[in-house]
Image (tube, helix red, strand yellow):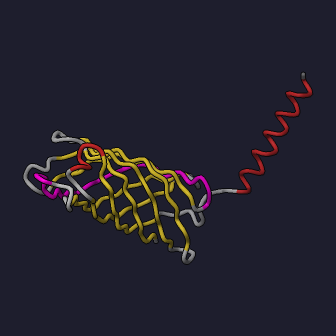
Amino acid sequence: MRSLALAIFLFVALNGASAQTIFSGPSPVRPRFNIDLQYSNPYGAKGNEFSYGLGGALGLDVPVTRIFYGTLSGGFMAFYQGDKAQNASTRSYIPAKAGAKLYLFPSIYAQGEIGVAFGIQQGAGSVLILSPGIGGSFHITERSAINAGIRIERWSRQNGNIEQVAFKLGYQF
């Protein structure tokens, strides 16, 4: 029994040490700025009113450790009625979010954000945003990358929640 425990301990210790050398985070570790274009596909109750959403965002990723970054973002998002709506109107928002990004591999990350968005039109109201997702940062040069991601967002508001699958494509420097 002791030899089994010793074997497990040695296996974990040796593999743990080699795992750190395999992946030590994205390189170089430094603050990163993001400019993103966004497209969303609303679903749920508001999916019947809004056909799609378009927007853009500016963001900042600040390293806490080699693989963990704090994030801040803000931008503009508009939901359009397209051909689905009968009595809906276009709604535009200015979202501001904060969160965290954890690199699982050198170019692949998991991200979670929470924030608020303020409606521009009368009746749009303000919303609470919850936004988990995954993405990738694919280097063009040492200091720039193409950033792409997908997330599931829930915008909680008084006049009905807006749930959406959102896609982003951007430039990171």
Residue at the spot 42% in from the left edge and 47% down from the top edge: 132
Say which quarter of the image contains residue 157.
Answer: top left
Residue 123 x, y percent position in the rendering: 9, 49
Which quadrant: the N terminus?
Answer: top right
Check the image and name the residue furthest to the right. 3
Q: Please, which residue is most extreme toward the left here?
A: 122
Q: Is residue 80 left or right of residue 6?
A: left
Return the x and y of residue 53 as percentages of the image width and height: 27, 60
Q: Please give left or right for residue 9 compared with residue 160 in the image.
A: right
Q: Residue visible at 52% across and 62% down?
A: 136
Q: Residue at x 26, y 54 (%)?
A: 95
The part of the chain drawn in magenta is 86-106
Magenta stretch encompasses residue 99: yes
Q: Main secondary structure of the magenta part?
A: strand
Residue 81 magenta-highlighted:
no
Residue at coordinates 13% horizontally, 53% vertically from top-left? 88
Relative image position of residue 104 (x, y in whole percent): 59, 52
Relative to residue 112, is residue 27 depicted above or below? below
Residue found farthest to the top: 1
Exactly how many numbered labels are in the figure? 0
Q: Position of residue 49 (x, y in %)?
A: 20, 51
From the viewer's side, name the closer residue of 156 and 107: 156
